[in-house]
Image (cartoon, rainbow, N blue to C red):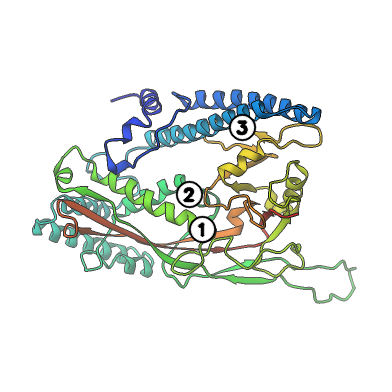
Amino acid sequence: MLKKKTVLALMAAHMVAFTNNTAAFGVYEKREEPTLGSISEAITGINTAFEEYKKTNDARIEAIKKGESTADLDAKLAKIDKDLNAMQEMKSKLEAVETKLSRQSTFEGSGRQDGEMKEDAEYRTAFFDWIRDPKNHKKQQKAQEAGAALQTKRVEIGLEKRETQATSTIGSAGGFALPKVVEQQILRVGVDASPMRQLATVRTVGTTDYKELVDVGGSTFEWVGETDTRNKTDTSSLREVAPTFGMASAKPQATEESLDDLFFNVEDWLIDSAREAIMEGEGAAFVTGNGTKKPTGFLAGPTPLVTGDKTRAFGTLQFLAGGAAAALPADFDKYYDMIYALRSRYRANASWLGSKAVFAEMRKVKNANDDYMWQPSAAAGQPDRFGGYPVFEDENMPAVAANAFPLALGDFKQGYLITDLVGLRVTRDEITAPGFVKFYVRKRVGGILRNTQAIKLLKIAA
């Protein structure tokens, strides 16, 4: 077996080539970019490039002050910026591969996995036996029986009734329930794909009727002497939030021959394919979803207002104007205002959320002491920082344009709620595409703004 370091090096050297001949892993754009063999090389390269970026930008600023042409410096800055983005992307891919390699394979051997009941393992084995040989009615019956035994066991050990209802589709026209360990793996790798899943509160629920009460503050107190009258004080205000749900689905397909090939890991392939398709759609919905058959994104609520937390109605986000009609702020003051518009309880866990293009512009920003406010990551698995707060890239955020909200800062764990309805289902389809087998995987997911005081927006406006 190849060592982890060797695998990382091979992955880095052949990132484009290794995907060209298989549709199962997608197709990557071919382009020139720095070749990096390890995460430490990526970090060193990023920091070196950023130092050159700062020197070039300083020279550009001086040229502007002197009225000189900046065409050459602009071109050099754009090239460094492109290299920085490429190295950041490669670092993220290397980190994802290292995480996968360092984690024990979900399907090592046919035995039980950590935390898996005997009935779960038996159903998983029977399920994938049937997936590989669907015309074998004995295997289908065995999968159905294993599923029924699993459901009975869950009732016996007192699992929530709603959870057992979610698995009642085993073997019915609604499709087979994915084995628990497979479902957990799809959700786990999805965290790496969606920044919102990393940042927000994520709950597994048993019904689309799920609601939460949010404490928005408002309690008061008074000072009293030992014998003074105790007056009534204001109590904290509670608000109800109810996520909107939708069905996220994916239809990965494989050739019939590949499923018969013992070297084809259908389990891992199914996980990766389903995760890639579902999480891409989820990510967009968590930001801009309109709530119709999908989650309600945090930018899809009532029109944000400039009004502060004390007087703004619950459910509406606050924005701060950037100061320019069609561009991001050029100095740190406006970003500083965003940071301190957040209450201290939310600043402690705050993060920036924006697109790659927005962060490219923010790399140029300095404070009043002429210090760059962007700080490249110094360790594997850690994001870059801006003004001391981590940055998370999400291409679902709006582009810079007049009256747009391209940048958010906040404690998203307090600010946004993601709800996964327990249970993923899969239906096998070998009819609609002769020679291919499609796997219709679906899950129900919801989302809603949880606390609108915990997130602030930057508006492109004077």
x, y percentage for residue 245?
Answer: 45, 67
Q: Which residue is mark 3?
A: 376
- Camera-nearest residue between 138 and 360: 360
Q: CA distance from mark 3 to mark 2?
A: 21 Å
Q: Which residue is mark 1?
A: 286
Foreground: 119 or 198? 198
Residue at 65% across, 48% down: 350
Quadrant housing residue 27: top left
Secondary structure state at the residue bearing disc 1: helix
Which residue appears at 74% of the width and 63% of the height?
309
Q: Which residue is mark 2?
A: 194
Q: Quadrant of residue 265?
A: top left
Amino acid at circle 1? Phe
Q: Secondary structure at mark 3?
A: loop
Return the x and y of residue 137 as percentages of the image width and height. Answer: 9, 59
Q: Amino acid at mark 3?
A: Pro
